[in-house]
Image (cartoon, rainbow, N blue to C red):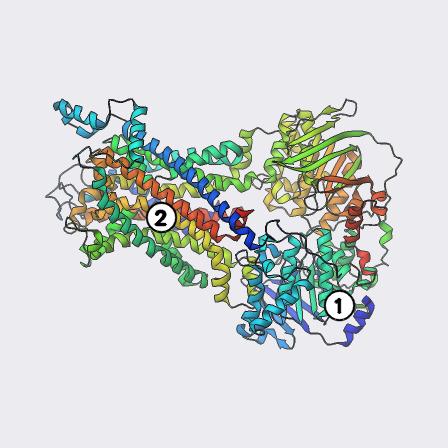
Amino acid sequence: MRTLARDPKIVIGGILTLLIVLLAVLGPLFAPHGEYEVVGRPFTGEGSFLGTDYLGQDVWSRVLYGGQSVLITAVLATALGVVIGGLLGVTAAYAGGWLEEILMRTNDVFLALPQILVTLLVLSAVHEPAAWIIVLLVGLTHVPRVARVARGVALPYVTQDFVLSAEALGESRARIVIAELGPNLVVPMLAETGLRLTYSIGMVAAIGFLGFSSDVGAADWGQMTNENRLALLVQPWAVLAPVLIIALFTIGTNLIADGLGSRAAKGAE
Amino acid sequence: MSTAYAPAGTPTAGRPTARRRPSATRAWLQWLLRRLGLAVLTLLAVSLLVFLATSALGDPVRAILGRDYAVSPERVEQLRQTLHLDQHPVQRYLTWLVDLLTGHLGVSAVNGLPVAELIGGPVLNSAFLVLIVAVLMIPLALGLALIQARTRGSWLDNTISGINLALAGVPEFVTGILLVALFSTSVFRLLPAVTVIPPGQMAWNRPSSMILPVATLVLAIVPYLARILRANLGEAMDSDYAELARLKGIPENRVVLRHVLPNTLVPTIQVTALQLAWLLGGVVLVEYLFNYPGIGALLVDSVRNSDFPVVQALTMLIAAAYVVVNLIADALSILFTPRARTGMVA
Amino acid sequence: MSTVDAAAAAADEAAVAQTVGLRVELTRSGIDVVDDLNLDLYPGHILGLVGESGSGKTTAGTALLGYARTGATIAGGRITVAGHDIRSLSPARVRSIRGVTIGYVPQDPNSALNPAIRIGDQLRELLDQHRIGTPAERTARIAEIMPAVGLPGDPAFLRRYPHQLSGGQVQRVALAMVFLPRPQVLVLDEPTTGLDVTTQAMVLSSLKELCADFSVAALYVTHDLAVVATIADRVAVMYAGRLVEMGPTQELFRAPAHPYTRALLQSIPHLHRPYRLTGIPGRTPSPGNRPSGCRFNDRCELAEDACRAEEPQPVAVKTDHWSRCRRTDALGPWDPDSRAGQDTDPDRERSVVLTVTDLNIFHGRNQVVHDVSFDLAAPEVVALVGESGSGKTTISRAVAGLHTQRTGSLHLQTDPTGEPAELARSARNRTAAQRQAVQYIFQNPYQSLNPRRTVEQILVRPLEIFGIASGRAARERAAELLDSVQLGEGLLRLRTNRLSGGERQRVAIARALACRPRVLVCDEVTSALDVSIQGSITELLTRIKNKHGIGMLFVTHDLALVRTIADRVLVLNRGRVVESGLVAQVLDHPRDPYTQSLIAHTPTLTGAFDASGSA
């Protein structure tokens, strides 16, 4: 793990991610104004240095408040998707036969629908969704994709003789998956987690951007871009501030994912 | 030893070409039928999923009417009729499926217009947008990857890699907003920020308003595609056959074009198909951002209004497009892999 | 032409290719991969370059074409090919020489032929690129060369893709490709690796004929001493980046003069007589870890202080035969028979532990093994011999319960006093005592040990599963087990990906021993390892068999190895036993034509002493 700190991609990505996570977590403590506090006329330079938004609320304060929901939703959704998808994929690879066939065919069905489409489909029936529904939606749409990757990562190990050797000793299937295969899959699956986190952030922000937030009116980086985008000409910072933060956040997590990915490729050799 | 003989190869390989033709056609037909069967099964499963998501998760009438639900019972009754809500869910699904298969997409729950009429124009506009992006993305990504592969390890290679990596993870609507800020509002004011198309006209009548949507999608796809192609090319350039070609005295340019590229064709097709499939979803956000009159913008509106017939039709359409793209990619992959191609006959 | 005549003739002619003081370095560190390499190649003659993995032999081979792999650079010395000073030429000029004047046959033609291009087009490309002859002449040349390598030259065959050919055919296409422009010099890098002996013998004889017919000077790079004895006129032995000995083939094998050459010869088995094999202690040092002075000093029995301090210079042993060893004079005379062993006594008593009756095995709908029956005593080694596809590994997997699609019965006696009991198809359905009694050692130790676990975890686990020991006792037992396979306790804490191939295979053996097995199934356990490691593993297995009274099922493709290790042998051809019996009986007086052909095609060291034409 110490060698990870020498990969510039992981270092830069780590610093970016850390900064933005800190901003999201600690932001509310430093906000000069309240989340819903009207500090001036809409779309003007009033308030603190980033000006005001469509309701005259302080943009900078709302940027500081608006990270927590994105961060928490994205992290939970990623965890959900990676855990379920990872287990399904590794099980499919190890079990083989009809179980693998069924799992992978079902997967194909879900893959036929782009993630954002499934989300919209459900949102058409559930207006003003609860926060957990968004977590569930984003997380579950990751599952087939993660499962595919996890199966691919596990396959070369599944056919290796050390697995056969454990079977010949009479090890239980669960132990083979956890103790024999598991440790070999940690780094590649971490890389996939990084990638999924990147996409989760994008999805959560996109849901806000399309105007389907769970908490309408609350400060949320995605929702803020939607609320203020018509004023890009007059008060660009109301949109650009959240957008730039989302961009930096995804660049950071993607850099980490890529660094871990090249590390996993090296480990597989 | 003068009696050296050639061990028999694969039994089919030695057959004269003339005898192979009909069986090759049959093998292809069999493959195609099997794959079409699978595609139909997939779409059936998707339809079930779509039906469940749109009509089982809540009361659609309540979702559509919102506050009106309580005040106008006659509208509720009317909607129930239109949506066949008096039927058993299984029957309702079958009715919907049969209608779908016979081309009856129903009428909008919001304005009563036929769905086919509503989505016709947007489908064409979106298809046009996707087509342009697809035509641009393949040569762009391949060109970048080739430049990188030929200058491996140089500053150029590293710079392109870095930029691609940074762009690959950024959500498309974020890229779009940044482009708008750069080219239409804050810095330059060159391009229209939103697509304004008068009624009766199609997107291609206003080429200038297509530039930003196309650019956004290209920027969202090309970096990812180029990175994968670059990795494939690099691997093939280190392969034993590339090394042997060099040891045969073949110039590097020819090694890349004749020996390396053909072997990266199939992964290129596969990853391109994957990206095209992503594009089918990606247009939703970008169209909404630019107000582009395609299925994406229509979908977001319909979702907001709970216009189920439209949402169902559009979702099935996108899933069908995905399945077709995949089928074509798999057929091309087999066609361009000698082993798979000759294996079809065996 | 006999080898002696050939060598004499060679001295008269001028070398057509030569390296003088060649040095290849790693580009970043400047550490040498190959150093001070002097090779001369004469028209019509084959020089065998022998070395184990990590010796730099492949690097030396491609350097002759002025080529170094990514990450390495040719840093010093002179390379002359047909009068061209390769290092002073422009890249374009070097390219025009490559493939035309000097050709290269790759290690693994299956990956070296382009899978996406028809073989006819790949053959033709070379002629097109170097503008040799008119298009009609090119077609004619291709049609001409194909029969010469034993392939049909008709257009239908040329339209095939590499995957439509058998392994031997692919290798022949590679040979045709390299002979097509009539080169003067040829570099062949282990071109018969992975081929069955019969195919290998045919490829080798074609090669030898072509070299003579076209007067080509060839460098044959390999790890296989028996192959070199069969094909080469002269032999150069390479160790850790340097040549250590060079001489005419017959002379070198009759009187090897370098301790490393001798140690190598002592670690390879012979077809016609059982020998006790010994390995070379330690491992081949990688570039950057090579000792100063003589690079073999840390593994050499005769090393003295001066060997560590000074670089040894070549010492002439005879005309044209030299050894890079300061102590050449101190070496005794070479007597290979001093290590000769005894064939198994046909009248010895056998106590049977495993009985296999009417075994039929299937892969899906294909039957791959037909009606195989045999038994195995303890202590005893029964060898299953055959070429690829003979079903030998499948049988061994069925015995271990790793391949379950079978009919017939297996009976195992789990303890010396008990009754034999039937074994279930799958290891999972067998009793713990049965699972414990049959242990399996895999071919590839790079795959059979989990790279993420430590040696200790790997050795302790079977002890826990079978309730042999746990906790501290288990850890102590693990150390004892390591000791019994001649590894130090220090390895316990290491993950297996830090170990060399030989060390891994020893750990795999220790893991099997941990279970105190009655039957040990060894599946090609030495074939992924270097020659010198193969010797010591064989020695170890023999010792274990005798000490613990284990019955061993030994799967191999190498008949010579059978002579050394096994008591009885079953020869398999396409899933059927064609001949079985005591090893000496079967190998010395084979009755089945298939066995006879296998034995005839197995390359042997004595090949060097026969007339050079017979392969």
Mark 2: few, some, or many residues within 10 Å (few <14, many ≥20)?
many
Q: Classify residue A26 by image quadrant.
A: top left
Which is closer to the viewer, label 1 or label 2? 2
* Amino acid type, callout 2: Leu
Q: Classify residue C242 by image quadrant.
A: bottom right
Q: Is residue A165 above or below residue C85?
A: above
Q: Nearer the viewer, residue B7 or B189?
A: B7
Q: Is residue C7 above or below residue B149?
A: below
Q: Which residue is mark 2?
A: B276
Q: Classify residue B2 by image quadrant.
A: bottom right
Residue C447 image position (x, y, % from top left): 61, 42
The disc numbered 1 marks a residue on which chain?
A: C
Mark 1: few, some, or many residues within 10 Å (few <14, many ≥20)?
some
Q: Is residue C373 visible?
A: yes
Q: Check residue C314 in the rendering and tell me which mark sits there, or answer none.
A: 1
* Amino acid type, callout 1: Pro
Q: Is residue C79 above or below residue A239?
A: below
Q: Is residue A198 visible?
A: no
* Pointer 1 with pointer 2, Cβ within 8 A: no
User: Label 2's element?
Assistant: helix
- The residue sitting at the right extreme is C347
Horizontally, is C438 left or right of B163 in the view? right
Q: Nearer the viewer, residue B148 or A189?
A: B148
User: Label 1's element?
Assistant: loop
The disc numbered 2 marks a residue on which chain?
A: B
Residue at the image position 32 percent from the left and 41 percent from the top:
B318
Q: Nearer the viewer, residue C391 or C534?
A: C391
Q: Check residue C70 in the rendering and tell me which mark sits there, or answer none.
A: none
Residue C537 image position (x, y, % from top left): 73, 44
